[in-house]
Amino acid sequence: MDRKQPLLLILVITIFGIAIAGAIWVFGRQNIQLRRDSMFADINRIAADAHAYRLRPAPLGGGGGSYARFSIPERLRSNDIAAYAVSPLSSGDTLLITATAKGNLGTITAGVDRDGKVTITLLTGDLAY
């Protein structure tokens, strides 16, 4: 019986280690999913603000039918999860929003069309899974 106890102890420690590693992996994936969902919500918030800007007449401080001069309001440019940037395309009818996750997790690029519809065009890094 004395010879089996060390083997049993090693087996229990190995199983326990595998269980801990699995739990860490699961919680890590969930954390990335929560960050990605939060970034999607922020992108939609920025897109709604940009579309309202596009619809507002130029004399009232809007884009007058174009995204060309839109910039993200200071309060939406960065948070604990990501930093956001916009780049209007040359026609002014489409706006690209790029969200760069903090912690080097990747980026999300989304396009906003003339009707305010958001289309996710690219996911990179850990955010792509």
Image (spheres, helix red, strand yellow):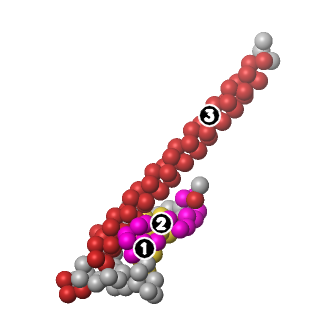
Please state the extent of the stretch shown in magenta in the rendering: 111-127
How packed mark 1 is, by other alpha carbons closer than 10 Å (few <14, some 14-19, many 20 or more), is: some
Magenta stretch containing residue 96, yes or no?
A: no
| Image marks 3 and 1: residues in contact by CB distance under 8 Å | no
Q: In the figure, 84 relative to 91: above or below?
A: above
Taking the spot 20% from the left edge, 87% from the top edge, the residue there is 59
User: Percent x, y for residue 11?
Assistant: 72, 27
Quarter residue 48 falls in: bottom left
How packed mark 3 is, by other alpha carbons closer than 10 Å (few <14, some 14-19, many 20 or more), is: few
How packed mark 2 is, by other alpha carbons closer than 10 Å (few <14, some 14-19, many 20 or more), is: few
Q: Earlier in the sequence, mark 1 or mark 2?
A: 1
Amino acid under label 2?
Thr
Query: Which residue lies under the disc numbered 1?
Result: 113
Quarter of the figure with the N terminus: top right
Does residue 74 show up?
no
User: Percent x, y for residue 37?
Assistant: 44, 54
Residue 13 vs residue 24, the one in the foreground: 24
Amino acid under label 1?
Asp
Q: In the figure, 72 relative to 23: above or below?
A: below
Amino acid under label 3?
Ala
Taking the spot 59% from the left edge, 37% from the top edge, the residue there is 20
Q: Earlier in the sequence, mark 3 or mark 2?
A: 3
Query: Which residue lies under the disc numbered 2?
Result: 119
Residue 19 bears which disc, if any? 3
Q: Earlier in the sequence, mark 3 or mark 1?
A: 3
Give the alpha-carbon distance from disc 1 to disc 2, as whole Å.
8 Å
Secondary structure found at label 2: strand
Left of 67 or right of it: where is 98?
right
Give the alpha-carbon distance from disc 3 to disc 1, as whole Å.
47 Å
| Image marks 1 and 2: residues in contact by CB distance under 8 Å | yes
